[in-house]
Image (tube, helix red, strand yellow):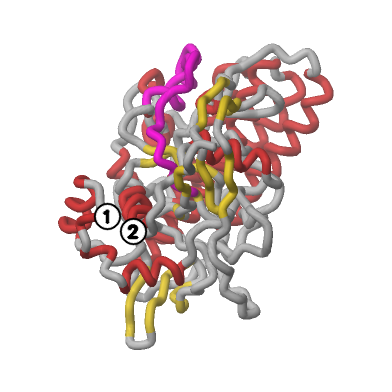
């Protein structure tokens, strides 16, 4: 999950009055969950940056606040004064229209303001938005809604970035207590959902919130294909490793093979092999891998290699969306509250939402007719449509209520610190 997955175009809203309480409640819930996620952290935990792709927890807390302060309060509340004139430089992410900013790979150098001061900043902006929400114009209310979805993206980044940070600590601390689990039987062989091909519609249909990269809705031509009814498990991935999957160049794209050799990749991120087999590090500390659970923390290169080894391929994003739209989109393991976050074995029926983001074979590019919005919020998405691949379905770290079958996430092919997994597809002969 990327912090840059699109923005919603602002549209006039004739139902302004009924929406104000709903928007205010959503704002309060979203802001409260972020602080609940931060509650177990020390000031040091919240300050350190473990790699350039990850941001400190304190920065996430402040950046999401800067978003509301800048695009809602500063731009739409007459007489509003910034909480601190230094904060726009410190907590702007990539908005060129908002001026100079601190370098992304040096966010861990912001030892001050402290975590306590950042929380004071959040509380002040929360109070200002709550005081202004009844008088905000329709366009500003749309920006509050966008800001809530933006913060939900950062909630996922918050926990995945902390997971990476704690994995770099030799003590491997747990952020949340482990849940007691009943043994789960291994799922049966993968089943296949066939489709004869033909014209289909994908993209957001215009009802409710969506980011701009999810539209416009448009027609696609599908060839006959089948898509797996579940994602690949840890046990199946262990078989790939045991069969020499990471040592056989036949299954790897050229860039992927170069990455494996240069980085010494031998297993998914956070996996370690010991005398008693494979273990994985999670937000609940180090545990034996659950063979029945979905494999996660694999890159596009690994996903593509596994698919080749399995005699299959990755689905296109159009194939994935058409299959997901025909399944139950409500269920799935997602983040409902602060606490342990971990993929869970499938409990029956094809589930396309939750547990792990699923790599597709589709490049992240604009749909036909896509146009970026005017102004700074137009930078939210369109300028990143280069060199990345689409993921679908959300994960156990995605806040519930944030996902849709049309939702498009995207990452570079080597990245794997998010909860990223694999669903297979294969071609079928024309009928």
User: Does 158 appear above or below 361?
Assistant: below
- Residue 138 is situated, as x and y percent measured from the top left of the image, at 70, 16
- Corner quadrant of residue 338: bottom right
Q: Which residue is mark 2?
A: 309
According to the image, label 1 marks what residue? 251
User: Residue at the location (54% across, 66% down)?
Assistant: 189
Instruction: Estimate how packed mark 2 is, as few (under 14), some (14 to 19) or many (20 or more) residues with alpha carbons within 10 Å.
Output: some
Which residue is nearer to you in this view: 100 or 104? 104
Percent position (x, y) of residue 180? 63, 78
- Outermost residue, bottom direction? 275
Q: Earlier in the sequence, mark 2 or mark 1?
A: 1
At 57% from the left and 73% from the top, the residue drawn is 186
Task: Let me know if residue 111 is in the magenta part.
Answer: no
Residue 333: quarter of image: bottom right
Q: Is residue 360 magenta?
A: yes
Q: Tag 2's secondary structure? A: helix
Quarter of the image where one finds residue 246: bottom left
Do callouts 2 and 1 mark residues in contact (Cβ within 8 Å)?
Answer: yes
Whether residue 121 appears in this view of the structure is no
The residue depicted at 59 percent of the width and 66 percent of the height is: 345
Please give the range of residues in magenta.
358-383
Is residue 94 visible to the viewer in this orientation of the structure? yes
Question: Eyeballing the image, is 78 above or below 51?
Answer: above
Q: Quadrant of the C terminus?
A: top right
- At x 73% / y 31%, what residue is drawn? 23
How many marks overall?
2
Q: On residue 177, which mark appears? A: none
């Amino acid at each position: 999950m990327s912090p840059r997955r699109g923005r919603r175009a602002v549209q006039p809203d004739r139902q302004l009055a009924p929406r104000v309480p709903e928007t205010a409640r959503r704002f309060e819930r979203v802001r409260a969950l972020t602080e609940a996620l931060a509650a177990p952290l020390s000031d040091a935990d919240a300050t350190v940056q473990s790699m350039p792709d990850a941001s400190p927890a304190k920065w996430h807390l402040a950046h999401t606040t800067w978003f509301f302060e800048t695009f809602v309060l500063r731009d739409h509340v007459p007489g509003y004064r910034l909480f601190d004139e230094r904060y726009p430089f410190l907590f702007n992410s990539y908005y060129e229209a908002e001026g100079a900013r601190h370098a992304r790979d040096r966010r861990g150098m912001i030892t001050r303001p402290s975590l306590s001061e950042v929380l004071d900043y959040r509380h002040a902006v929360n109070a200002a938005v709550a005081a202004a929400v009844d008088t905000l114009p329709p366009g500003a209310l749309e920006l509050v809604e966008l800001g809530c979805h933006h913060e939900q993206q950062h909630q996922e980044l918050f926990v995945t970035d902390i997971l990476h940070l704690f994995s770099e600590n030799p003590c491997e601390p747990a952020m949340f207590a482990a849940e007691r689990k009943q043994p789960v039987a291994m799922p049966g062989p993968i089943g296949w959902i066939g489709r004869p091909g033909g014209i289909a519609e994908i993209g957001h249909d215009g009802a409710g919130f969506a980011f701009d990269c999810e539209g416009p809705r448009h027609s696609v031509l599908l060839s006959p294909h089948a898509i797996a009814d579940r994602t690949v498990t840890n046990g199946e991935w262990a078989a790939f490793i045991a069969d020499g999957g990471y040592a056989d160049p036949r299954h790897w794209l050229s860039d992927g093979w170069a990455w494996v050799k240069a980085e010494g990749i031998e297993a998914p991120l956070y996996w370690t092999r010991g005398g008693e087999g494979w273990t994985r590090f999670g937000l609940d500390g180090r545990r034996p891998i659950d063979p029945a659970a979905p494999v996660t923390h694999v890159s596009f290169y690994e996903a593509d290699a596994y698919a080749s080894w399995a005699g299959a391929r990755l689905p296109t994003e159009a194939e994935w969306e058409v299959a997901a739209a025909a399944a139950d989109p409500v269920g799935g393991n997602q983040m409902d509250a602060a606490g342990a976050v971990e993929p869970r074995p499938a409990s029956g029926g094809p589930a396309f939402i939750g547990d792990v983001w699923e790599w597709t074979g589709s490049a992240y590019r604009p749909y036909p007719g896509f146009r970026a919005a005017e102004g700074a919020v137009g930078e939210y998405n369109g300028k990143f449509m280069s060199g990345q691949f689409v993921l679908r379905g959300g994960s156990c770290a995605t806040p519930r209520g944030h996902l849709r079958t049309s939702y498009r996430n995207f990452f570079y092919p080597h990245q794997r610190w998010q909860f990223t997994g694999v669903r297979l597809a294969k071609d079928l002969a024309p009928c």
